[in-house]
């Protein structure tokens, strides 16, 4: 996003575009990448409710993937998974 | 019991792209709170990690109306907004049911914001104040607060050869809030999302001032790995350092895991084991500090017994 000059800023520093932080991709902070094993996953959604970055994508009650645009690689999902369905891998590792 | 499947159908009101640290407890808490809310909410946020990192101009992670306030006055800010809402509702200018929330860290709640909080509670505004308690001023680089546990090393209570970190026990804010005789307050932990979301729903459906004190692990300040956050907030509960309870119209009640411990259905774990996993207590694990460590365990046990008594056990 182009930075605004003071003349373009709204009064009081108002931000009217709710949730525009999605334009800022925090995924590049990550040094470890969660990999989900679809075979082991039971869609219990423990990882989803515990994710600090809403990076577990859920559709109709099923996990459809991990949003690497925002995942910071904290590894909580891997730790809380009761089925060992998420593994953390070093970024860059094949 | 909430169904995660049902919750997952709701809109995510804290957008990703916020710049809280990897593994931050505050963002987990906020997500769970907002998912639990069944009506539209308006939020005031005291200065702190959550406020700063979710709204780095010109970005905001909030998909709800959100007011930045200073360190000391989140409760006063939300009280003002709520008063305006009541007026507009009376005049018929607003017809929707809206709930009013304030978020503050332990610095903004236990220390700097306590007068605003106490005032808002006493005036009886229809608000829910949530303290995400990470036990220090993490945003400015880990300075001690009155919520910092005894023995924790922070930059203003540094552990050295003589001083074993913070010398004082944290004050019991939940009990202080309960002493305002408000209709509902309690303590919870994001590791027990059922407990947390249940209490949020209960608080939001209660008329009048309500308060929740939620333990919020901080990998930077507590000095643990980022993936340990949920385990840390869990062990804080199982060790009875952070019991889950609620006070409803003066009646004290243990809930969830803590209730099970009190009833002998679950094992109480050692506080020392919990402390061992955090770097902020690292200096305590020497021969010379053994009695100091034991004094912490004793104090936590005593507090737990007191709480149990209050809850009728």
Image (cartoon, coloured by chain):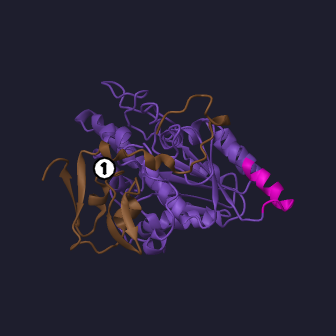
Q: Is residue B292 above or below residue B102?
A: above
Q: Quadrant of residue B111?
A: top right
Rendering coords of residue B255 (x, y %)? 50, 67
Q: Quick one: which residue is furthest to the top in this view?
A: B161
Q: Is residue A78 left or right of residue B197?
A: left
Looking at the magenta stretch, what is its main secondary structure? helix
Q: Kindly tell me whether residue B242 is visible in this rendering.
A: no
- Residue B90 covered by magenta stretch: yes
Q: Quick one: which residue is furthest to the right in this view?
A: B91
Q: Is residue A6 above or below residue A20?
A: above
* Chain identifier of the brown chain: A
Q: Kindly tell me whether residue B214 is visible in this rendering.
A: yes
Residue shown at the point (68%, 39%) measured from the top left: B115
The number of discs equals 1
* Chain identifier of the purple chain: B
The magenta span reads B81-94
Residue shown at the point (82%, 59%) measured from the top left: B93
Residue shown at the point (52%, 51%) measured from the top left: A19
In front of the other: B51 or B269: B51
Rendering coords of residue B301 (x, y %)? 42, 53
In front of the other: B95 or A1: A1
Q: Is residue B287 above or below residue B226?
A: above
SS assignment at label 1: loop
- Chain to which the residue tagged by mark 1 belongs: A
Where does label 1 land, which residue? A74
Rendering coords of residue B229 (x, y %)? 35, 51
The crowd level at tag 1 (other Cα within 10 Å; few <14, some 14-19, many 20+) is many
- Residue B151 covered by magenta stretch: no
Q: Is residue B279 left or right of residue B29?
A: left
């Amino acid at each position: 996003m182009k930075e605004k000059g003071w003349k373009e800023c709204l009064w009081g520093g108002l931000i009217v575009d709710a949730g525009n932080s999605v334009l800022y991709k925090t995924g590049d902070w990550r040094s470890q990448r969660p990999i989900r094993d679809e075979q082991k996953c039971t869609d219990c959604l423990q990882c989803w409710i515990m994710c600090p970055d809403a990076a577990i994508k859920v559709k109709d009650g099923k996990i459809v993937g991990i949003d690497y645009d925002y995942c910071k690689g904290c590894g909580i999902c891997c730790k809380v998974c009761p089925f060992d369905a998420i593994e953390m891998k070093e970024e860059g590792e094949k | 019991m909430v169904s995660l499947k049902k919750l997952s159908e709701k809109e995510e009101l804290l957008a990703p792209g916020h710049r809280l640290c990897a593994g931050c407890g505050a963002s987990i808490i906020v997500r769970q709170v907002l998912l639990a809310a069944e009506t539209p909410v308006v939020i005031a946020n005291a200065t702190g990690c959550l406020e700063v990192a979710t709204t780095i101009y010109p970005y905001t992670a909030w998909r709800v109306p959100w007011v930045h306030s200073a360190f000391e006055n989140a409760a006063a800010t939300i009280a003002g907004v709520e008063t305006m809402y009541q007026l507009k509702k009376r005049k018929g200018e607003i017809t929707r049911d809206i709930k009013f929330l304030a978020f503050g860290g332990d610095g903004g709640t236990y220390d700097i914001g306590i007068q605003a909080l106490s005032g808002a509670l006493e005036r009886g505004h229809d608000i829910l104040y949530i303290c995400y308690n990470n036990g220090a001023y993490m945003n400015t680089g880990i300075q001690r607060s009155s919520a910092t546990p005894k023995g924790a090393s922070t930059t203003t209570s540094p552990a050295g050869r003589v001083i074993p970190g913070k010398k004082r026990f944290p004050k019991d804010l939940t009990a202080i809030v309960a002493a305002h005789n408000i209709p509902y307050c309690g303590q919870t932990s994001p590791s027990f999302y059922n407990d947390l979301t249940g209490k949020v729903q209960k608080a939001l459906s209660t008329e009048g001032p309500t308060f929740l004190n939620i333990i919020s692990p901080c990998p930077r300040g507590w000095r643990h790995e980022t993936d340990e956050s949920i385990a840390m907030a869990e062990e804080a509960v199982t060790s009875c350092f952070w019991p889950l309870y609620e006070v409803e119209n003066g009646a004290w009640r243990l809930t969830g895991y803590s209730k099970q411990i009190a009833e002998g259905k679950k094992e109480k774990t050692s506080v020392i084991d919990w402390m061992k996993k955090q770097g902020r207590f690292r200096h305590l694990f020497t021969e010379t500090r053994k009695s100091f460590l034991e004094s912490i365990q004793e104090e936590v046990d005593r507090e737990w017994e007191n709480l149990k008594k209050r809850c009728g056990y």
